[in-house]
Image (tube, helix red, strand yellow):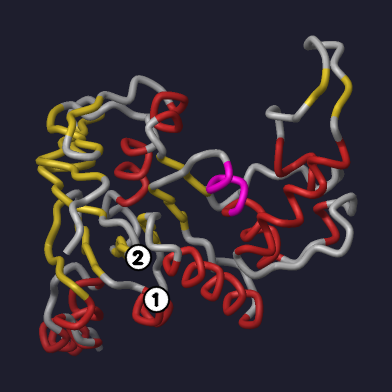
Amino acid sequence: MSEPLIRLENIVKRFGNFTALDGVSIEVHPGEVHALLGDNGAGKSTLIKVLAGVHQPTSGTILVDGRPVVFRNPLAASDAGIGTVYQDLALNPLTSVTRNFFMGREITKGTRPFGIMQTTEMNRITREEMAKIGINIADPEQAVGTMSGGQKQTLAIARAIFFGARVLILDEPTSALGQKQQLEVLKTIKRVRSRGDIAIILITHNEVHAQLVADRYTFLSLGQVIGNGVAKEIGGEDIRRLMAGGAQMADLEEELATIH
């Protein structure tokens, strides 16, 4: 097994008297999809914001390539190779695919801010990078608003990889998509995994999608890790139990049976 690209050791995050994360430890390996699962309020969003440099942990250690790091802000996390694709995707639907791909990192010739934008080169890169992970864009000048939900996800993923993401965090990438578009996104995730050099953290409520693409699981409940392991060791019943916060199905059924 490869060494982890990123390791979190005993991460604690408190907001005043509230403890959002309570001693969370995970390892994320290149060439793997690591599914992060748990109900609302489990701590998933806080954890990815710690990884993305939005929040600094109250205590604990983040290691990248075995070296401790401190992410003071999202730029520091990005410079370390942490790329986060949030649910809103940070895309402008009125501008072109290419402009969204480069968004603030446009290729120009000449001295900024008066340089001439190299549109032809940017269009070529956008088309090639998206094709690498399965989406062929006939016209990179088309408005992003004309793309399908799955294509938009692929655009955001391709952008993160091109600009140096080694750890790719995908926040509920299939939510609010139709079945066909969900399949597009899952195919994209598998293509990225097949490169072998990128570690993917998949945050999802969909246990079926997790089972289709995940190599490793971590389950959170109330800010704590209640289970983890590789996919071949965790069955569907284990996944359902752990997603329910570790409760046994029989316990839930017994509690429901008391309601008349």
**Closer to the camera in the image, 195 or 134:** 195
Q: Which residues are magenta?
A: 158-162
At label 1, the amino acid type is: Val
Query: In this view of the protein, which residue sits in the foreground, 259 or 104?
Result: 104
Specify whether residue 251 is painted magenta: no
Q: Secondary structure at mark 2?
A: strand
Which amino acid, by three-letter code, is at mark 2? Val
Q: Are marks 1 and 2 in contact (CB under 8 Å)?
A: yes
Label 1 secondary element: helix
Query: Residue at 19% of width from left, 83% of height from top?
Result: 232
Q: Position of residue 168 (x, y in %)?
A: 43, 51
> Badge 2 is on which residue?
33
Q: Residue at x 24, y 67 (%)?
A: 217
Left or right position of 255 against 212: left
- Which x, y percent locates residue 158? 60, 53
Q: Residues within 10 Å of mark 2 (few under 14, many from 20)?
A: many
Q: Is residue 65 above or below residue 42?
A: above
* Residue 252 in view, yes or no: no
Q: Earlier in the sequence, mark 1 or mark 2?
A: 2
Q: Position of residue 18 (x, y in %)?
A: 20, 35
Task: Name the residue located 25 percent from the left edge and 54 percent from the top edge.
Answer: 28
Residue bearing the label numbered 1: 213
Task: Decide if residue 10 is on the left or right side of residue 40.
Answer: left
* Viewer can see residue 24: yes
x and y percentages locating residue 9 in the rendered image: 12, 41
Check the image and report above or below for 102 versus 197: above
Q: Residue at x 79, y 45 (%)?
A: 98
In this rendering, the answer to whether 132 lies above or below 181 is above
